[in-house]
Image: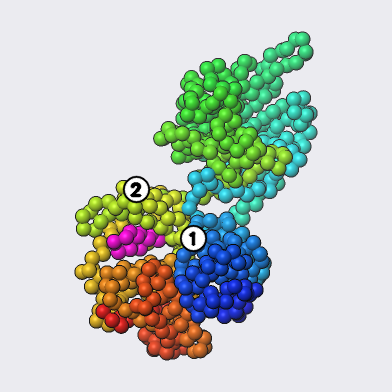
């Protein structure tokens, strides 16, 4: 149950006015007697006379909110919040923003609400998990990002690769006793390793001495079994360089080397055959089957400065390097390839459209589609590079100098799948165009709405919630269908809509009442919800088809709470129900409302009702006064 303070705020909202505007007296009377449709017209008159203030805007927004006109409610809440309002107004604005799919903006409003009422259960729930809505997967967001604890914030750390036995290898310029590189004035790179613990923390990094030399070593790639490593190394270490006589400079290139893990140490280090004094070969990534090695190089035959290449591998035999072409490479720099076990190639580029500096991209080599930018969070205006992912451990790593120095960040994959909805006429089996298809989360928040094109819509959603598809089309009965994923990457929801004809309506009409599914309200609330609006639209259709019909809406509560409070709550709910129907164009003379509180329970379970029994008692009845 919500705490007393929360409940008190709700009661104030419907019984007391804050900062009343002297020009809105008529509208206020209509609002306070729950005549929201007429109140809207009256408040709009004040607005049109240019006598409105933030109080009027708030009242107008609340009126729209109570009849589930989300877009208008959002518009007027935004104007009302130019001035400070009571906590409940911020809460309501957050709800309409969620219904519009504006989740970050909704969270901002909930942050304000939580500061104003920190003890409210809604505030506590928000602060515990502010991003509880599993929002539609933004095409530009594939990972959540966290900083790792292994970084030396004064030196460069990058090239992190996690083995299947939880050893994380990376390269760093952290203090290792080496002399400085004259080009960067920083220590040469060394290869380090650390172990990831069960709780996600890491042991203190230690240098891999059997691999490191006085010059640059790393980054690395590992075989699937973790027993073979291919790594970059500066040619100085092997005596492979060109002498620049005039300046007494020894110019070396990066090359690739192979090492084997024997008795816990890396041994048998050998150079790969395509290393050269004339060009650099670096940034290796070995496919999971060990048959293809990807790397970056400025070798002849490329497209730009440095390109991504691949070469076939057969034990100790290597084929001829192949350029990956314009699918990946540009006239600028590409580097740091990483090939995942599902044949997704991640790489960094300065030549493709991005946020600035190096951005990280991915391309599915199975489909050979255009490369996709990994989007905000992963990419920034700074250099973002050296991405790797262990799909078994569901952990990715990348590096960025967004803090001013190269640091390693953890990339947590966002589980996503596609929901395709096919909408057809139940009788003709023809696809229906221009139907409204909404996807709702487990809390019945509207995540997004699309209009069918040739009977089809498609949503990309996160895996961490249950979803419901709701389909509406004028002239058809609306349909609600639960989404059952069952670990599939794509599911198809078939929505077969029944045309609304008088014969079908007759099934909903008895001698005494119109039978609808239960119109639910939030606990202790009386505003119309999305689910309630969907059901009441059926009543609107029936009333339009039977223009002489008159309806009495009787609203009931469960048996919890004081009888007097329940009576007033049911009266508000009954009024909100008919106000919604009136807002859809039905004459107010055809509707009446009666709140009965807990006087006539459907199940007489008194104070020992189960949740299921309470739900049946919280109901609205639509009695036919006149056919």
Q: Quadrant of the C terminus?
A: bottom left
Q: Which residue is mark 2?
A: 453
Of residues 461 and 78, the one drawn nearer to the viewer in this rendering: 78
Q: Residues within 10 Å of mark 1 (few under 14, many from 20)?
A: some
Residue 328 percent across, percent down from the top left:
50, 29
Give the magenta range: 467-481
Question: How many numbered marks have been drawn onto this rendered protein structure?
Answer: 2
Residue 439, how many percent across, how many down? Answer: 42, 58
Q: Which residue is mark 1?
A: 71
Residue at 56% over, 23% down? 331
Task: Answer left or right for 390 relative to 493.
Answer: right
Decide which of 561, 333 is in the foreground and name it.
561
- Tell me which colouring the rendered structure shows: rainbow
Q: Give the answer, above or below, for where 268 lies relative to 489.
A: above
Quarter residue 470 falls in: bottom left
The residue shown at (28%, 81%) is: 626
Mark 2 → mark 1, Cα distance in angstroms: 23 Å
The image quarter containing residue 330 is top right
- Farthest residue in the top direction? 246
User: Upstream in the sequence, badge 2 or badge 1?
Assistant: 1
Question: What label does residue 145 carry, if any?
Answer: none
């Amino acid at each position: 149950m919500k705490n007393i303070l929360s409940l008190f705020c709700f009661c104030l909202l419907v019984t007391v006015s804050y900062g009343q505007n002297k020009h809105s007296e008529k509208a206020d009377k209509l609002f306070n007697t729950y005549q929201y449709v007429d109140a809207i017209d009256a408040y709009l008159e004040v607005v049109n006379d240019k006598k409105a203030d933030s109080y009027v805007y708030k009242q107008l927004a609340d009126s729209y909110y109570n009849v589930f006109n989300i877009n208008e409610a959002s518009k007027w809440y935004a104007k009302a919040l130019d001035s400070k309002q009571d906590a409940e107004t911020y809460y309501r604005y957050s709800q309409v923003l969620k219904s519009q799919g504006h989740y970050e903006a909704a969270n901002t409003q909930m942050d304000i609400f939580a500061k104003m009422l920190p003890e409210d259960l809604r505030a506590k729930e928000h602060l515990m998990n502010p991003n509880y809505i599993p929002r539609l997967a933004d095409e530009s967001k594939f990972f959540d990002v966290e900083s790792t604890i292994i970084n030396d914030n004064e030196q460069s750390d990058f090239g992190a690769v996690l083995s299947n036995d939880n050893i994380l290898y990376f390269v760093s310029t952290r203090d290792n006793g080496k002399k400085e590189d004259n080009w960067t004035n920083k220590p040469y790179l060394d290869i380090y390793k650390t172990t990831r613990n069960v709780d996600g923390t890491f042991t203190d990094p230690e240098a891999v001495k059997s691999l490191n030399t006085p010059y640059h070593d790393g980054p690395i790639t590992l075989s699937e079994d973790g027993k073979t490593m291919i790594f970059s190394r500066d040619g100085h270490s092997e005596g492979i360089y060109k002498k620049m006589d005039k300046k007494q400079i020894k110019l070396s290139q990066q090359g690739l080397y192979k090492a084997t893990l024997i008795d816990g140490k890396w041994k048998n280090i050998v150079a790969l055959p395509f290393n050269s004094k004339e060009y650099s070969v670096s940034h290796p990534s070995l496919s999971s089957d060990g048959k293809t090695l990807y790397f970056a190089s400025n070798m002849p035959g490329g497209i730009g400065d440095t390109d991504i290449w691949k070469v076939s591998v057969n034990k100790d035999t290597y084929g001829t390097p192949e350029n990956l072409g314009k699918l990946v490479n540009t006239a600028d720099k590409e580097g740091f390839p990483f090939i995942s076990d599902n044949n997704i190639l991640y790489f960094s580029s300065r030549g493709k459209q991005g946020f600035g500096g190096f951005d990280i991209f991915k391309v599915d080599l199975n489909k050979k589609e255009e490369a996709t930018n990994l989007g905000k969070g992963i990419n920034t205006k700074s250099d973002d590079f050296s991405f790797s992912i262990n799909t078994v451990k569901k952990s990715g790593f990348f590096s960025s100098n967004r803090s001013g120095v190269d640091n390693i960040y953890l990339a947590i994959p966002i589980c996503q799948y596609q929901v395709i909805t096919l909408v057809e006429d139940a009788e003709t089996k023809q696809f229906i165009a221009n139907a409204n298809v909404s996807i709702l989360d487990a809390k019945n928040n509207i995540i997004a709405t699309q209009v069918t094109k040739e009977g089809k819509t498609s949503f990309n959603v996160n895996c961490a919630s249950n979803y419901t598809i709701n389909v509406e089309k004028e002239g058809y009965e609306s349909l609600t269908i639960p989404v059952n994923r069952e670990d599939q990457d794509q599911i198809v929801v078939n929505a077969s809509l029944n045309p609304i004809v008088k014969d079908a309506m007759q099934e909903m009409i008895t001698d005494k009442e119109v039978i609808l599914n239960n119109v639910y309200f939030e606990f202790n609330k009386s505003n119309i919800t999305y689910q309630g609006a969907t059901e009441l639209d059926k009543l609107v259709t029936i009333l339009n088809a039977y223009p002489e019909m008159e309806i009495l809406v009787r609203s009931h509560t469960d048996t919890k709470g004081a009888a007097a409070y329940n009576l007033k709550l049911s009266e508000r709910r009954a009024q909100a129900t008919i106000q919604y129907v009136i807002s859809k164009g039905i004459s107010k003379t055809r509707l009446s409302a009666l709140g009965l509180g807990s006087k006539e329970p459907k199940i007489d379970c008194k104070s020992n009702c189960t949740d299921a029994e309470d739900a049946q008692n919280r109901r609205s009845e639509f009695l036919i006064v006149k056919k």
